[in-house]
Image: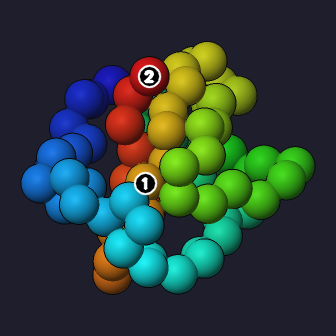
Amino acid sequence: MSNDFQFDDDDFAKDAGAGTGSRVFDEFDCPGCNANNPVDDTFTDGDEVRCNYCGCEFKALVNQEGRLRFREL
Ligand SMILES: [Zn+2]
């Protein structure tokens, strides 16, 4: 199990309310254990998601390019 996911703080320092659009996702790959997690509901930038496998919780962050990243809670 690696812990090699990247989080670049600079990308998010000013993106709140910057008009990143409303991309929504219905699944995510856990940054902690790499498991693919479908979610019952959709989530988008700023939502919190929880891995069904390792139980870690993350805040979903979508940058201006529409790329999904996670911040561990
Ligand atoms: Zn996990």
Residue 10: x, y in percent? 12, 54
Left or right: 68 with respect to 3? Answer: right
Residue 56: x, y in percent? 53, 21
Q: Is residue 39 above or below residue 25?
A: above
Residue 70, which numbered label?
none
Residue sitting farthest toward the top? 55
Q: Is residue 26 above or below residue 32?
A: below
Residue 70: x, y in percent? 40, 44
Q: Quadrant of residue 25?
A: bottom right
Between residue 52 and residue 24, name the one nearer to us: 24
Q: Amino acid at mark 1?
A: Leu
Q: Amino acid at mark 2?
A: Leu
Q: Residues within 10 Å of mark 2 (few under 14, many from 20)?
A: few
Q: Residues within 10 Å of mark 1 (few under 14, many from 20)?
A: many
Helix, strand or loop for disc 1: strand
Q: Which residue is mark 1?
A: 61
Left or right: 13 with respect to 35? Answer: left
Q: Which residue is mark 2?
A: 73
Q: Name which residue lies at 66% across and 70% down.
A: 24
Q: Quadrant of residue 57?
A: top right
Which mark sits nearer the N-terminus, 2 or 1?
Answer: 1
Q: Is residue 39 visible?
A: yes
Q: Is residue 67 above or below residue 4?
A: below
The C terminus - image quarter: top left
**Scheme by which the image is coloured:** rainbow
Q: Name which residue lies at 44% across and 79% down.
A: 19
Helix, strand or loop for disc 2: loop
Q: Name which residue lies at 49% across and 39% down.
A: 59
Residue 40: x, y in percent? 87, 49
Between residue 19 and residue 43, name the one nearer to us: 19
